[in-house]
Structures are given as structure tokens and as C-alpha cells.
Image (spheres, rainbow, N blue to C red):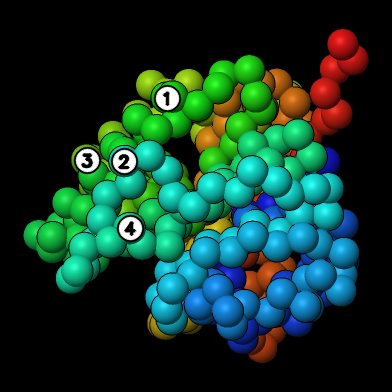
Amino acid sequence: MRLATWNVNSIRARAERVVAWLERSDVDVLAMQETKTRDDAFPYLSFEAAGYEVAHRGTSQWNGVAIVSRVGLSDVEIGFAGQPTWGEPAAAEARALGATCGGVRVWSVYVPNGRALEDPHYAYKLAWLGALRDAAAGWPTTDPTVVVGDWNVAPTDDDVWDPAYYAGRTHTSPPERAALAAMADAGYTELTAPTALTALTGSRTSGTAGRFTYWDYQRLAFPKNRGMRIDLAFGNAAFAQRLTAVAIDREERKGKGASDHVPVVLEIAAPAPG
């Protein structure tokens, strides 16, 4: 099975591009983030015509998560237990969606940005990551489960173009990285890191120039390769043992109408007989 995650940065603006990529890339399941639309405005027909079932959660022009699948889509779950709230009135934002696809439990997550270290949104981000870890710790360990999406945290200094540039900013602060790494306490391994993939499969992803998944639209960030690796996949042991390959499709950052993120694709083997 081929499973991917992609922050599409407005699905209504990019539905045609996303569907074309799905067909060209032969992807079975795609988790999307930042769809930026309400449920009733999602372009369901475009995906259904291509053979995909759709689950989407969106309430406004902000946030929004989706899962589309051509290998089955069931047991859809909006949000996770204990998910923190935000706003006035306080409510759980459209940032997490789970579904079972082809026997794999898939979660699409869009972690809060944090904005700035002194901003209340930063504390919300840390609380959100902590609650996700706690929820994941309670999920069944025998079911292959993967949590994919835009985590808005670069795990290490190797995952940003210039660590000095991010000093004193969000996405690389020690508390954020600690909250991300704590997914290991719930039994989940970051599977899209080059070192993790090498340890699991003996293969390697592309080098540093091809490891980023996000580039700002400003200041010629993409041509200068001033990017970050923040689109990640955390899998439990039942999922990790089936992982065979990971790829970052850097080409999708090119051309007119591109998202500022690119797809990350995971290939998993069929379950062992018996």
C-alpha cells in the first residue's frame, strides 16, 4: 500500500493538482492538512470520480484535515480524546481526523503553529502535542497505526536550512522538540527521518538537499532551498515493521499554484500471512 501526507494549503484551490498527483503517483491513501474549507464546500466529486472515498473535517477557511482512500475508509473519528480547545468560544479545531484504510489506522494531524514563543498559541501547541501523545498511548498496539501530517516542528537542526535563523523562534525550540520526541513514550517512531528509515529497512531517503518538506513563499526560499522538514509520520511497531520505503516528492513544490509543502510518501508491505 502506498500512503502519503500533504499539507495542500487550500484544497479548493488545488483539487485538480492533488487528484492529478494521486493518479500519477499511484497513491492509495492520502492524508491532507490545511484544507481551508468547510465540510459542505470540500470538492468531494473530484476525488470520488478518481475512485477515492473521502473523510473531511473543516469548519471555516482555516485549518481542516482530510483522508481520501481507494482501499476502503471506515471508522472515521473526528479529533482525539483530550484534544485541547482554542478560541472564543473555546472549541476543538479541525486539526485531527482518523480512519481505517486497507487495514491500517491512519491519523491526519495539523499541529498548531505556535506563532511565537511568548504567544498563548505556543502553550496551546505544546498542550496539543502532549494530549496527542497521551491519546496515542491508549490506542491498540496490535493494529498498524500511523499518525501523519504537518507537525510544525523540525525534529533536529539537520531538518532546517539554518539552525541559527530559527534561534528564538517556534518550530525548533527545545520544548517543542521534546513534545514531539515524546511520541516515543506512546510507542510511536518517527519513520520519515533518514536515519530511522535506514535502521528499519537498510535503505535511505535522498540527501539533505531533498529532505525538506516545506519552503516559505517569500524570499525565494524554494530556489535557495531554505526549507524545513516538518511533514512527518509516526508509526507504531505494527506499522513500522511493514514500512519498506519513504520518498519526498520535491517536484510538487514547483510550478504555478503549488502548495508551500510537498507530499511525503510511505510504502508499506502487505501483512504477513497468518
Residue at (42% x, 78% y) in the render? 60
Indicate left or right for 166 with 261 as reference.
Answer: left
Tag shown at residue 236? none
Point out the frontmost of discs 4 and 3: 4
Q: Nearer the viewer, residue 201 or 144?
A: 144
Residue type (three-letter) at the residue carrying disc 4: Ala
The image position of residue 97, as x and y in percent, is 53, 52
Q: Which residue is mark 3?
A: 175
Specify the amino acid type for callout 1: Ala
Residue 246 vs 27, above or below: the answer is above
Residue underneath mark 2: 82
Q: Badge 1: few (under 14), some or many (20 or more) residues near its Cα, within 10 Å?
A: some
Kind of element beneath mark 3: helix
Q: Secondary structure at mark 4?
A: loop
Residue designated by label 1: 137
Q: Which residue is mark 4?
A: 92
Within-10-Å neighbours for mark 2: few <14, some 14–19, many 20+: some
Rendered view: 31 above or below 222 = above
Q: Position of residue 152 (x, y in %)?
A: 39, 55
For the point 42% across and 24% down, the residue is: 137
Q: Amino acid at mark 2?
A: Gly
Looking at the rendered image, the quarter that the C terminus falls into is top right
